[in-house]
Image: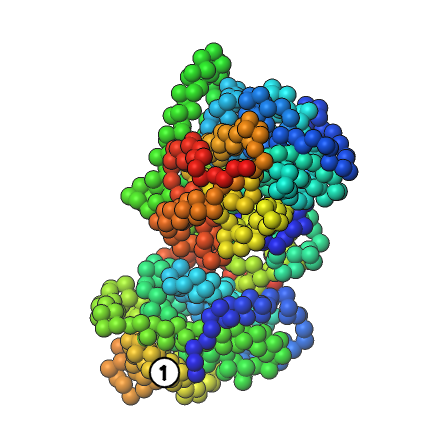
Amino acid sequence: MSTTEDSKKTAKPKAPRKKAAAARKTTARRKSTARKKAPEKPLSVLIVGAGFAGLGMAIRLKQAGIEDFIILERGNAVGGTWRDNQYPGAACDIPSNLYSYSFAPNPNWSRSFSGSEEILDYVHHLVAEFGLEKHIRFEQNVAELRFDETKGIWTATTDKDVVFTGRAAVMAQGPLANCSFPAITGIEDFKGKKIHSARWDHDYDFSGKNVAVVGTGASGIQIIPELVKVAKHVKVFQRTPGWVMPRPDFSTPEWNKLLFRKVPASQQAMRELLYWSHESMALAVIWNSPLTRIAERIGKWHLRRQVKDRWLRRQLTPDFTIGCKRVLVSNDYYPALQKDNAKLITWPIARISEEGIRTVEGIEHQVDCIVFATGFDVSHSGTPFPVLGRGGRVMGDDWKGGAQAYKSINVSGYPNLFLTFGPNSGPGHNSALVYMESQLEYALKGIRKIVGEDLKMLDVREDAQQRFNKSIQKRLAKTNWNSGCKSWYLTEDGFNATMYPGFATQYATQMSEFKEEDYQTA
Amino acid sequence: MASIDLDKMLAKIKSTQWALSDIDWDAPGAELITEEQWPKLKEFMADLMWIEHVGARAFAALAKKAPTDTLREIYSYFHAEEQRHANAEMALMRRWGMLEGDEIPEPNVNLRIIIEWLDRFADEMPVYVLGTVVPMLEIALDGALCTFLLETVKDPVCHQAFEKINDDESRHLGVGFTVMEMQGRSASYIKMVQMMARVMDPRLILGIASYMPLLNKMRDNVIAMGLPEEKLYKAMQKFERIGGRTEEGRRNPWFQLIKQHGRWVTNRSNKVYHVPVDALVKITGMVPRKALPAVPSWVKELTYEPTATR
Ligand SMILES: Cc1cc2nc3c(=O)[nH]c(=O)nc-3n(C[C@H](O)[C@H](O)[C@H](O)COP(=O)(O)OP(=O)(O)OC[C@H]3O[C@@H](n4cnc5c(N)ncnc54)[C@H](O)[C@@H]3O)c2cc1C
Ligand SMILES: [Fe+2]
Ligand SMILES: [Fe+2]
């Protein structure tokens, strides 16, 4: 994953053409209410982002009887990650039954691991089912969040200077929502087609084309098998190989769907089973334990079984502890690399030229199209847009040495503000939505307090935040993420502001308790 | 000479890359190769190109083993750069009409044995072994041979290519000697004992056994082409001089070992060494090609084409 923190030329995502029909289901597209002046009475809650996090927050607010909130979304459709990542083969790595909200189950998952279209359909289903359209303001790209201490109000200003106000604000702009082309020398010289995996061009026809794919992370290994099916030739440029585990994917039999529909408890049971099997993976992935060795053995077995050539196997063998970077899951990636029209290239890239990619062994690999599966712009020490708190303090400045929060969700000095996927909330082994649910519950508690007790300010105490971080960094030091490999989880200095060092269950426990004494109110 | 800053070196390496297409392989000058030179030059180039390729594979092993991220990345660049040298040398051979069709030149049997050894054991060798052997080979074979080549061959394109190759090589050597010094500095008594124990490792003995005839075979090749033997030996003495320029470098037992070996090679009157090794060269020369295992697939990545669409 790229971590170009300064690249702010983030492309505004649009609904992919293919999805236009689906997007239309959400009738509230393009309801952009342009008001230059903030209305007199602020809303209860401002939510930034209409992905799983923002929409989940909206649902929980509605379920709690809070209706005066809006969601500001820069795109023209809902879905976030799953609206943007529509590349061929896009799918989730977590079983669908776990990658969904328990407060809005979907009995109809067609496969144990769903593709991105199906996940997007689920998102649209959420919007329709809970009547969220009227709350969403599309094409509102938030450029600043600012807290007014005297009034106890958050103001969101968009890049077109439209202003919205709310008593509480929820940042749900997504951990992996921004992407840009990597800073490879000569990239602007390339005369062919350039596509970023997270901004797929569905109009581009790959048949008969020579294609390069740069990057072999989570997106790359999903795209490659699909491209190999249609393109004339696919060259895969790899920097470091990741751990690839076999994926037990199968389609859900009809009787099973029926069972889930008729006996919802059976789906809940399935969810629990999946939850606990993923929890047990934490033992292998998060800490260096005997299970880590076993997981590595499974990875190596998978490689040996699918790749017979010794050199290719060497090229694909990871040289870091499993779990240090994101664990990949695929059954068709290794076979795809060995197709006649595919080739793995492990020479370092020297530069991009007009006609292709030059690697250090001196050869120019000429292609018609370069697909960049190079990940996202992840910021460990900044915020995607300026966030100003009490006394005009800037969150990005407070985070210079690495992002810090209290229980991942509140930051001292920024009252009434709730982060989703905040510092150290990252799931390494379990569904992001499982983690998300506990964050939403926590935010709901805080928001209810603010609204119910008519508080101007609910601010976490500085010392409480420090105590929390001391203990979490101590725990992180013992994890695989901090075991020496470079990954997007870490800052350049190796500070881990991303991951949660424990089981999802521990995280849920952490989030279930709202300690009033850790807060200052006014 | 103080050790170099490896981070700066890596940045330098990244910013000074070249590609085969930077050279016009069809420019005039190929006719400057004399008819008399041609057959010997062909054999020489084939060996040289294989040595580059073998060096590449050794760097690949180092790239997995090196103790720091920076060094690992440097070695992965060097791996590719040696491959680039092999590719460029093949492009020269093609220019001179020395390749038949798309054929990669046949490696000689000594090289085949080294390739086999590298393929099986290189990744298991401790970093300090390869880290010492590689600079030695680089100076002796690469360095000396290239200088000689430029003195014999008048073709300007050859000079253009080797100017670039030699720039790369000077960096390889800079890093190589810095690493040897780093190792000497940390080599405690226990480490040294461990290192020496390694010499007894049968895999290493195999490696040395294939490396020694290679040096002698190259010596024969070079002499066949009219290079005064002394030039090769001078180059090897350079290894001793640079590698032993600091206390740390001298303390690296691998430096001592390889240096000693270099001395044997360069001393023709040392019958104890040369009689059996020359015999080995003869014997390996008689090994039928069919008896050798299939070449590993990393060998098939060689190409003389500056651009590739497949
Ligand atoms: C290819 C891919 C595969 C993944 N697979 C899995 C998986 O298998 N399992 C798993 O648990 N997680 C997975 N994830 C992680 C995934 O990102 C999360 O699970 C989840 O979808 C994030 O939801 P979100 O709402 O927080 O963010 P997003 O879905 O990114 O939504 C954020 C929304 O905010 C909007 N926005 C951003 N900035 C602004 C702004 N300034 N103003 C207004 N709106 C803004 C964006 O347009 C977007 O719509 C995957 C991610 C990717 C990219
Ligand atoms: Fe070389
Ligand atoms: Fe070299």
Residue in the image at 30% along x and 44% along y: A289
Whole-percent x, y for residue A228 in the image = 57, 41
Of residues B216 and A403, which is closer to you in this image?
A403
Of residues A33 and A110, which is closer to you in this image?
A33
Looking at the image, residue A164 lies above or below residue B310:
above
Looking at the image, residue B61 lies above or below residue A300:
below
Give the quadrant of residue A129: top right
Q: Which residue is mark 1?
A: B246
> Does A122 sit left or right of B134 as displayed?
right
Q: Which amino acid is tagged 1?
A: Thr
Of residues B310 and A336, which is closer to you in this image?
A336
Residue in the image at 54% along x and 45% along y: A413
Looking at the image, residue A217 lies above or below residue B140:
above
Disc 1 on helix, strand or loop? loop
Of residues B65 and A436, which is closer to you in this image?
A436
> Does B246 sit left or right of A148 as displayed?
left
Residue B298 visible in image: yes
Whole-percent x, y for residue A87 in the image = 60, 38
Residue in the image at 44% along x and 70% along y: B51
Residue in the image at 47% along x and 78% along y: B143
Whole-percent x, y for residue B162 in the image = 56, 76
Residue B100 visible in image: no
> Does B139 sit left or right of A478 as displayed?
right
